[in-house]
Image (spheres, rainbow, N blue to C red):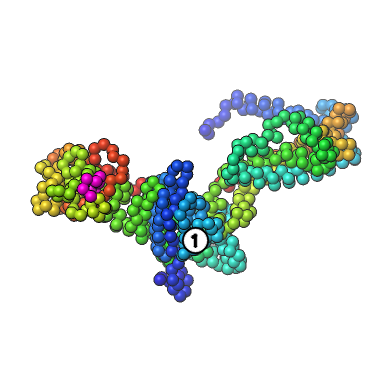
Amino acid sequence: MAETANGEAATPAKGALTLDHVTKLYGDLHAVDDVSLDVAPGEFVTLLGPSGSGKTTTLRIIGGFIKPDAGTVSLDGRDLTKVQPYKRDIGMVFQNYALFPHMTAAENVGFPLQMRRIPKAEVKKRALEALALVRLEHLGDRYPKQLSGGQQQRVALARSFSFDPQLLLMDEPLGALDRKLREALQLEVLRISRQLNVTVVYVTHDQEESLVMSDRIAIYNEGRIEQIGSGEDLYERPTSLFVADFVGESNIYPGTLQAEPHPAIVRPAGPPVRVPAGAGARVALSAGDRAAVVIRPERMRIRQGGAGDGRAAEDGSVASLSGRLRELIYLGSDRKYVVDLDGGGTAVVRIQAGTEGAGDVLGPEVTVSWAIGDSVVVTDNAPRAGVGGATLTAESEPLA
Amino acid sequence: MNQKPSPLLIVVVVLIGIFLIAPTVVVVIMSFSSLTSLSFPPPDLSLRWYRNFFQSPEWTDAMWTSIRVALLATLTATVLGTLAALGLMRGRFPFKTAVTALILSPMIVPIVIVAIGTYIVFVEWRLQGTLFGFVAAHAILGFPLVVVNVSASLQTMDRNLEMAAQSLGAGPIKTFFRITLPLIMPGVIAGALFAFIESWDEVVVSIFLSSPFMRTLPVVMWTVVRSQIDPTIAALAGMLTTLTIVLLSGALLARNLGKRGK
């Protein structure tokens, strides 16, 4: 129970949001498909997913701008499903700021207070307080078009919380800003949400942003929440191929799960890949099911020479695959090796600068290896596409 | 695109401009004539025809009628047209395209047809020759002009602003008056000015609706021109043209202000 912004007596955090089996159809398309989500008071939850995956629709359902076809939305136990948006007391920040161009910054921030019939003097005082929290109290008299993009978004932020809502919704609020400013504002938004102890549901398609800001991240795919958890959960323990592929860079080898003689993924081409015992059970898979094994590039090692066979390992705890080095990419802090594996597929290996042997010249014959315990088995829900191999996600975060 | 236009282009444009403006300029110059017949160029300058206009009850009565009709018709067309534009742009209902076409039809149907139709119905309803009849008929003509202008404003307005207002606690009515209306005001003003000009200049429908006691200025001009021609009509033409230019400039200015506000 943190203190409020004014340092008043600590109040129990409010803003417990519950989505219960929410569905929204557009024609035959499930824009939001049976989404259930519990957000604790004061929690920062990000909805992350590719465009069109239903995250913005979910946000607008919470805000009351879209009526769900099924399911309920409730806040602190109060069913909001049929409540009009202007009676919900939920703050919202939009990607394009949505500041009222005919009002000054202070008037924008004071607008929600005015709507609540708060006396003029107090509106002014509280608007300035909210502006002070985003460090713009000196620009209250400016009109939106006299402010920079970053300043406009700060005003929009101040406006969204000036009336003390229990819940803030943010729809890609930093999407229109350049990278430097975005990173600064990420921390600013985080600071303010902590200070106000307000629940935040944040929509973005930028995974780096979601990792920086969120307590938990919900990965959206085709209208459903594919997995929800902390950034570490999603990165270290993805449950599906989609999540493994979407969050961070991965080496993904799809195939069929086998149990005997030892747990492994049998690939359509190339040698099978050993996986940890019980790895299939974690995601409720059993022998014969479609599955994929995921190894993060920084968990892999690379060495000169061939003869890795994928099963055999020095002491049974290391898996290896042989191949030919295709590319060596210098990234400053890291070196990235791209290897065409024998029998098909690709491996990406990331070696941190300063690691022993990081600068060695390698190739063309190389072997990549990793501790079997560092690999994760995920369900393969992706449409099968050709010979399995590594999926290379973009190096940096996807940009709008 | 910043290159200088060729001299030939400039000459052609100036000639076209002269061609378009010259007749009006000639009429305005003739209105200052001291002679009783229309002549160009006038041998002497005088304001007698302007004095004549304001001293003749036939003209001034018509002018007051015109002003009353135009103001009331503008008010009616602007309120209804703004509401209709909101409905068309924001609402979701069946046969929207058909409704839009119907609303715009007064701009498309030949004015004589509108006039005859209005006449037949208004005689039946005893509205012919009444102020209410004039206002109703002119409002219908101005209505699509308002709809078109306000729709254009609504189209360029960011709908997130309305959503933001609602999320901040403004109900639909407050959202309209505090957010939507101020932002589409340039379109509303432009539409209103066009509607005013439409009513002020309208002659065909007005001829059908007029009675000896209820005539708008263009109707009297039409009647007078057919029987006698003296420079009074030129004086009036000069004044009407000036007023129209002022209003039209206002409408275009309002539109531009709206665009620049984006």
Q: State the residue lying farthest toward the bottom.
A: A9
A70 up-or-down from A165: above or below: above
Q: Is residue B211 left or right of residue A363?
A: right
Q: Residue at x 46, y 69 (%)?
A: A5
- Mark 1 surroundings within 10 Å by alpha-carbon count, few (fewer than 14), some (14 through 19), many (20 or more): few
The answer to whether residue A216 shows anywhere in this view is yes
Helix, strand or loop at mark 1: strand
Quadrant where the N terminus of chain A lies? bottom left
Q: Which picture quadrant has residue B233?
A: top right
Camera-nearest residue between B70 and A382: A382
Q: What are the residue bounds of the magenta stretch?
A: A286-298
Disc 1 marks a residue whose amino acid type is Asp
Camera-nearest residue between B58 and A264: A264
**How far from the left and from the top, in percent, is residue A223?**
40, 48
Camera-nearest residue between A14 and A21: A21
Q: Residue at x 45, y 54 (%)?
A: A71
**How far from the left and from the top, in percent, is residue B81?**
68, 43
Magenta region includes residue A289: yes
Q: Which picture quadrant has residue B122?
A: top right
Magenta region includes residue A190: no
**How far from the left and from the top, in percent, is residue A268?**
21, 39
Count the labels in the image: 1
Q: Is residue B197 left or right of residue B43?
A: left
The answer to whether residue A340 shows anywhere in this view is no
Q: Residue at x 34, y 56 (%)?
A: A228
Q: Residue at x 11, y 52 (%)?
A: A316
A35 up-or-down from A270: above or below: below
Q: Is residue A157 left or right of residue A368?
A: right
Q: Is residue B253 left or right of residue A104?
A: right
**How far from the left and from the top, in percent, is residue A276?**
18, 53
Residue bearing the label numbered 1: A79
B2 up-or-down from A56: above or below: above
